[in-house]
Amino acid sequence: MKESFYQVNGIRLHVTESGPAGGPVVVFLHGYPEFWYGWRKQIPFFAAQGYRVVVPDQRGYNLSSKPAGTGAYRVSQLTQDIVELIAALGTTKVLLVGHDWGGAVAWNLAMHHPQLLRRLVIINMPHPVVMRKTLRRRPDQLRRSWYIFFFQLPLLPEWTISRGRFRLMRNSLRRTSLPGAFSDADLEQYVAAWSQPGSFRAMLNWYRAAVRHRNPAMVQPPEVRTPLLMIWGTRDAFLRTEMATQSLPYCRNAKLHLVPEATHWVHHEKSDEVNETILDFFLRPGK
């Protein structure tokens, strides 16, 4: 693997890359509270298959830029980062994989910049319209999403969650995942990333921007025409599984792969199944 920085959309993105320079480009987008390291079980697998694997720290995370203010974390800005990264990579189309918040960015990119995508994989993140409707209509989903509202408070979330070397965050990852998904050594990597100056506030600003700056795609979304694979761990503590099936009608050509024994962190827990399922989707003939 090699690390580099790309100047895009007025910021600097830290990017980890692996695989042959001339291979098909696959971009992996992490979610909260991860960074490039969250794809550590996918990077060597796809590089060995001949793909050029590109994994950015999205803005606000780890070694990437951390612009001030919630407006800098609107989904349109997050999406533009990846649009310009694709151009900077010297390619016209990529395979795109997004998990959690990375999935939200991937949804938005597919709706507004489909010409940049060959195929799309979304892991445990519903279509934005489904997210909005479910939050409004299902009290149990509101309860699962309580932290979104806590994150809207000024300063208190940063202070509370960072105490004891991010004890609450470390415990949350362990509590909401299967045993062994996050080792002690893994969590040390996460603590180092969360401890980067300004990083944790920037990470929370993704949630603050989502509440304060509405995404138009949550109201009148364009149809997703890119061939799409959804992978969903059904023991997700944060998101209802029905949100996955409800997302499919917003897509022209979509397939859902459920993993009943996995959680929100399915790409950590069932990495072999996830990797092989994605690879099969990438290699499938046709559009």
Image (spheres, rainbow, N blue to C red):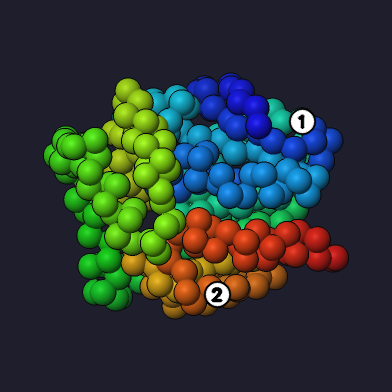
Q: Tell me the kind of residue under disc 2.
A: Leu
Query: Residue sitting at 53 percent across and 58 percent down?
Result: 267
Query: Residue sitting at 55 percent across and 75 percent down?
Result: 258
Q: Which residue is mark 1?
A: 90
Distance from disc 1 to disc 2, alpha carbons, whole Å, reads 34 Å
From the viewer's side, name the closer residue of 189 and 123: 189
Can you tell which quarter of the image residue 257 is in? bottom right
Label 2 SS: strand
Query: Residue sitting at 71 percent across and 48 percent down?
Result: 46
Residue 100 visible in the picture: yes
Question: Is the C terminus in the top left, top right, bottom left or bottom right quadrant?
Answer: bottom right
- Judge from the rendering whether residue 232 lies leftward or rightward of residue 50; answer left or right: left
Sequence-wise, which precedes: disc 1 or disc 2? 1
From the viewer's side, name the closer residue of 161 and 72: 161
- Judge from the rendering whether residue 176 lies leftward or rightward of residue 276; answer left or right: left
Q: Tell me the kind of residue under disc 1.
A: Gly
Circle 2 packing at 10 Å, graded few (<14), some (14-19), many (20+), is: some
Marks counted in the figure total 2
Mark identifier at residue 182: none
